[in-house]
Amino acid sequence: MGFPSFFSSLMWTAGSAYGASLAQEQSGRSVRKATDAQQIARDLQDRVDKLVLACMAMWELLQEKTGLTEEQLLEKVREIDLRDGREDGKSKPSEAPTPCPSCGRPISPRRTRCLFCGADNPQAKAMDTAL
Ligand SMILES: [Zn+2]
């Protein structure tokens, strides 16, 4: 094996090792991303479970205190579901900004205060701002 051949063989080996190292590094990053995604999914599931529990508690209290029925609840769910024109089991909050009562600049309905002047947003709805 002449020097050029030895050199190219050495470079090929080094290149392979480097390639393998890169592949291992990318694989490690992929595993970390998957692990991060799994953790995010678990955190979201925990939050959903807590929200379901809070909703169940509120509903049972409302039934006990007011006498509301399951039928009334389901009718209200359907009414709210249809507000965006589609019965799809989802509620899409209004995204249209409204003018700030103080400075006139647009405020998202998701904001409780104007970003520009700090005035309260009278259009803010509790459920929209919580999302
Ligand atoms: Zn303002």
Image: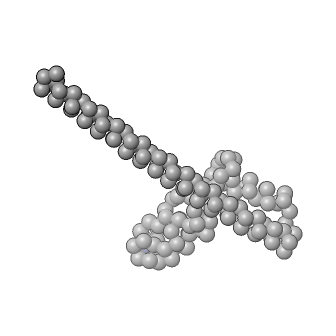
Q: Residue at x 67, y 64 (%)?
A: 50
Q: Is residue 98 visible?
A: no
Considering every residue shown, the one lying at the far front of the view is 1
Residue 80 horizontal/vertical position (percent): 69, 57
Judged left or right of residue 68, residue 34 is left
Question: Depth check: 96 or 127 in front?
Answer: 127
Residue 86 horizontal/vertical position (percent): 66, 47
Question: Depth check: 17 or 89 in front?
Answer: 17
Considering every residue shown, the one lying at the far top of the view is 1
Q: Quadrant of the C terminus?
A: bottom right
Question: Depth check: 63 or 40 in front?
Answer: 40
Q: Is residue 16 visible?
A: yes
Quarter of the render that holds ligand 1: bottom left
User: Is 56 placed above or below 15 here?
Assistant: below
Residue 117 horizontal/vertical position (percent): 41, 76
**What number of labels is visible?**
0
Residue 45 horizontal/vertical position (percent): 63, 57
User: Is 3 placed above or below 14 here?
Assistant: above
Q: Residue at x 58, y 66 (%)?
A: 130
Judged left or right of residue 54, residue 129 is left
Question: Colour mode?
Answer: one colour
Q: Quadrant of the N terminus?
A: top left
Q: Residue at x 58, y 59 (%)?
A: 43
Judged left or right of residue 3, residue 116 is right
Q: Residue at x 62, y 65 (%)?
A: 127
